Image: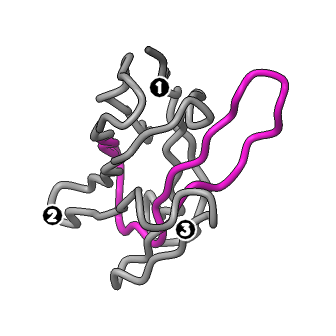
């Protein structure tokens, strides 16, 4: 059984920073891409950033230059460093991963989400 557990969300003032973490645990043979999505109230879930096992990254235009995604393959963990936060970054942030539990297939998994609120 695979679990993705996020941490690091909270309340921050505009211009502030937060660092999100997401650790994958359970039966894991290999992990391909990992990433972060977000969903604001009344809006669809959208991609924030993704990173491959080789370290290639892609970002939503709205966060380029402010957010940085990274991963520690030894710890099966992905991070999202968020700087210069804006009120429009307020959302529930979800971690995702394309991983193989046993080496025979690749499944897509989601974390439970962590709330990020940017407000003065």
Mark 3 residue crowding within 10 angstroms, few (<14) / some (14–19) / many (20+)? some
Residue at image coords 50%, 66% = 64
- Mark 2 lies on a secondary structure that is helix
Question: Which corner quadrant holds the N terminus?
Answer: top left
Q: Which residue is mark 1?
A: 116
Q: Is residue 27 magenta?
A: yes
Examine the rendering and report whether any part of residue 107 can be seen. yes
Viewer-nearest residue: 86 or 7: 86
- Of the image marks 3 and 1, the number of the one nearer the N terminus: 3
Residue at image coords 37%, 33% = 6
Relative image position of residue 98 (x, y in whole percent): 54, 62
Examine the rendering and report whether any part of residue 25 can be seen. no
Relative image position of residue 55 (x, y in whole percent): 34, 80
Image marks 2 and 1: residues in contact by CB distance under 8 Å: no
Q: State the separation of the CA atoms marked 2 and 3.
A: 23 Å
- Mark 1 lies on a secondary structure that is strand
Q: Which residues are magenta?
A: 21-50
Residue at image coords 48%, 69% = 33
Q: State the separation of the CA atoms marked 2 and 1.
A: 27 Å
Please state which of the two labelled residues, at mark 2 or mark 1, is closer to the viewer.
Answer: 1
Q: Of the numbered discs in the image, which one, if any, rests on residue 59?
A: 3
Relative image position of residue 67 (x, y in whole percent): 40, 57
């Amino acid at each position: 059984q695979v679990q993705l557990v996020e941490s690091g969300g909270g309340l921050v003032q505009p211009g502030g920073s937060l660092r999100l973490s997401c650790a994958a645990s359970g039966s894991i043979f290999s992990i391909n891409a990992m990433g972060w999505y977000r969903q604001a109230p009344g809006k669809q879930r959208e991609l924030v950033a993704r990173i491959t096992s080789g370290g290639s990254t892609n970002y939503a235009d709205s966060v380029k230059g402010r957010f940085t995604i990274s991963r520690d393959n030894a710890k099966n963990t992905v991070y999202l460093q968020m700087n210069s936060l804006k009120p429009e970054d307020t959302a529930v942030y979800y971690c995702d991963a394309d991983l193989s539990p046993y080496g025979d297939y690749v499944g897509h998994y989601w974390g439970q989400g962590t709330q990020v609120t940017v407000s003065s």
